Image (cartoon, grey):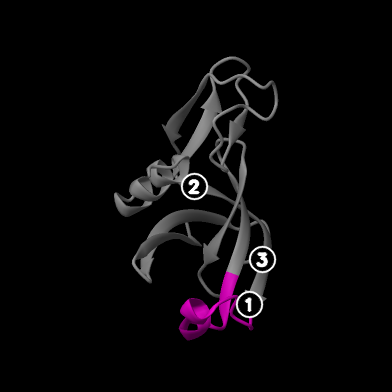
Amino acid sequence: MTTLADHYWAGCAAGELRYRACTACGARQTFPRAFCPACGSEAVEWRRAAGTGTVHAAAIVTRAPSDAFRPLVPYAILLVDLDEGIRMMAHGAPGLTIGQRVAVTFHLHDGRHLPRFVPL
């Protein structure tokens, strides 16, 4: 079964950060939905993000949410304001601070390429 998220993860595997944009009202979203949460339109399409942004918040994870992430602990989780005007959560390089400019990279973990931001 194919899901909307499959297109997102295929982009990550190809080194692309993708997001959804509504062609009716222009709203953007990082969470893949079949409709626009702003206006309800189903006229949404995938777009490729530049992959750059600014750190909005940062935290260190010291307790893994699952066994698959236990080898990574401790690791940084960020909220990043992408230059396209949307905010997303992703892994980050150690030591990133609020307000710092970052660029996305991808790291393979447990069979999936996860977005990870590094200093720009």
Query: What's the mark number on residue 52?
Result: 2
Residue in front for this viewpoint, 97 or 36? 36
Picture layout, residue 61 above or below residue 32: below
Q: Residue at x 63, y 77 (%)?
A: 61
Query: Which residue is farthest left?
Result: 14
Dot label at residue 61: 1
On the rendered structure, is 7 left or right of 65?
left
Boundaries of the magenta span = 61-76
What's under tag 1, amino acid-wise? Answer: Val
Instruction: Give the residue furthest to the front.
Output: 1
Residue type highlighted by circle 3: Ala
| Magenta segment includes 52 | no
- Who is closer to the viewer here, 74 or 36? 36
> SS for tag 2?
strand
Residue 95 visible from this viewpoint: no
The residue tagged 3 is 58
Q: Residue 37 is drawn in which quadrant?
A: top right
The quadrant in which the N terminus is found is top left
Q: Is 95 displayed left or right of 45 in the figure? A: right
At 56% from the left and 39% from the top, the residue drawn is: 83
Q: Nearer the viewer, mark 1 or mark 2?
A: 1
As rendered, which of 103 and 75 lies closer to the eye? 75
Residue 15 in percent (x, y) is at: 33, 51
